Image (spheres, helix red, strand yellow):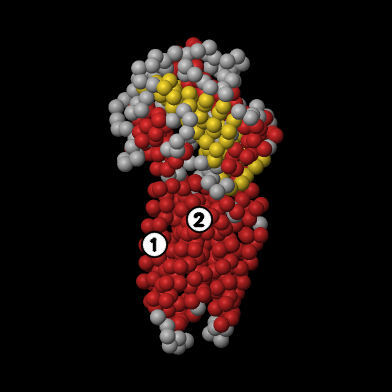
Amino acid sequence: MLSATFVVAVAGLIYELIAATVSSYLLGDSVRQFSFVIGVFLASMGAGAWASRFVGDAVAGFVRAQVGLGLFGGTAAAVAFFAYSTTGAVAVPLYGALVMVGALSGMEIPLLARILGEIGAGRFRFENVLSVDYLGALLASLAFPVLIVPHLSLVAAGAAFGLLNLLVALGTLVLFRDRLGWADRGAWAGAMVAVAALLVLSGPVQGALDARLYEDEIVLAERSAHQRITVTRFRDRTRLFLDGAVQFDTADERRYHEFLVHPAMAAAPRRARVLILGGGDGMAAREVLRWGPDSVTLVDLDPDVTALFRGRDDLAALNDEALRDPRVEVVHADAFAWVQEPGDAFDVAILDLPDPRTLSLSRLYSAEFYRLLRRRMGAGGVIATQAGSPVFAPDAFWIVERTVGKAFDPAAYHAYVPSFGMWGFVLGLPEGMRLRQARYPEGLEVLTPEAFAAARVFDAATGPRGGPVNRLSSHPLVAAYEAGWDAWFR
């Protein structure tokens, strides 16, 4: 029974982590969603522990709790993805399943304690049960990011641990077979068939759910240690999604990357050593290489993304095989930690980073980060960062501009990218340096000197505004980003 305590503790925490991951994946803002999930789960556990006093037969109650956990916990991720792909709503089914799983998990320890007392475990001590329970939780918290997420889809992980609960139920059915009837055995068998089938078919099920989430044919879908990577294709158009958010569409990605890269390269006095933070798809590197730099250092967190766009011929062709160029060095590291390391100075830095929708991403748009980056730049070093939409989230855009201004002289501009809408960028120049534009390389599809001059003009609704600076101690950028996008799309 103590072994059962360990197993159910592992499964219970895994369900909680799966729910938090699904919630942050589909609803955004990982800090908020993890906080909500933990709070709801613990409150539900408390309610379940309190309700366990009304369970007359502890053995039957424990078996039924395990069957319920196997069924609700094992299928929660699949149900949430299905609801999102069909109705666009996920909060009710996800948090409904979380309440059920939390309540049933809360019943486990009180019922186990009663069973141990009933069978005459003379040396039974309740603290032993809690110790084993906490040890199981520790194992689950370590295994989830290191072993489970990199190797199993969330649907498969839920089903696998659902089977663990059902195996605990089976052991209890065998040990106490004289006290349990055919109804409990039948319920267990039905749940076992359903959850086992979901595990066996988790690949096709996940593929079918992904197909409903994305409009185009899915040519690749995998989960790395950091994010879910999906590549879709429609005719000659290819799109990359990370955690469900579109990163580029080949129909218009040159609009984005030309405006991100070339104004900074044209403004810099020197372009021999270039740094790219993010940009694991190699598109920014492709544009940088047009200027003939001596070296390009690309720092991206996820080795799976860079491996795809360097190793697969069809995807490498999209960046003109930039990541295969001997001048390009790819480093896999957290950008915030990497810029703190000593090293040679750079002439230009291109920040092709994800939107600041979480605190971990907001660090990369903080005053502290830009000051660290300034120390890695040469005397005439210029940076450029994508800064979100001045239309959909204008407060957030101008927070980025003001924050860049804590380490550089900022220069904001924008361009229309159909996949994203009106999109904004900020140049960071050395103090006192005049913004100039050298001759752009031949063959650009969108950017011209006239287009850049127009991009520097903002209308009354999107123009400069006052507000705070984004700092590690406060992070107003995340709230402004969420408020802006929610006003338009939620």
- The picture quadrant where one finds residue 477 is top left
The picture quadrant where one finds residue 181 is bottom right
Who's the residue at 51% across and 41% down the image? 333
Label 1 packing within 10 angstroms: few (<14), some (14-19), many (20+): some
Looking at the rendered structure, the secondary structure element under dot 1 is helix
Q: Nearer the viewer, residue 107 or 121?
A: 121
Q: Give the labeled residue for mark 2.
A: 18
Q: Is residue 425 visible?
A: no
Residue labelled with disc 1: 42
Residue appearing at x 65%, y 53% in the figure:
203
Label ID, residue 64: none
Q: Which residue is rendered at x = 57% and y = 77% of the image?
A: 171
- In the image as oriented, which residue stretches furthest toward the right? 313
Give amino acid for label 2.
Ile
Q: Give the residue at x 42% y 76%.
A: 128
Q: CA distance from mark 1 to mark 2?
A: 15 Å
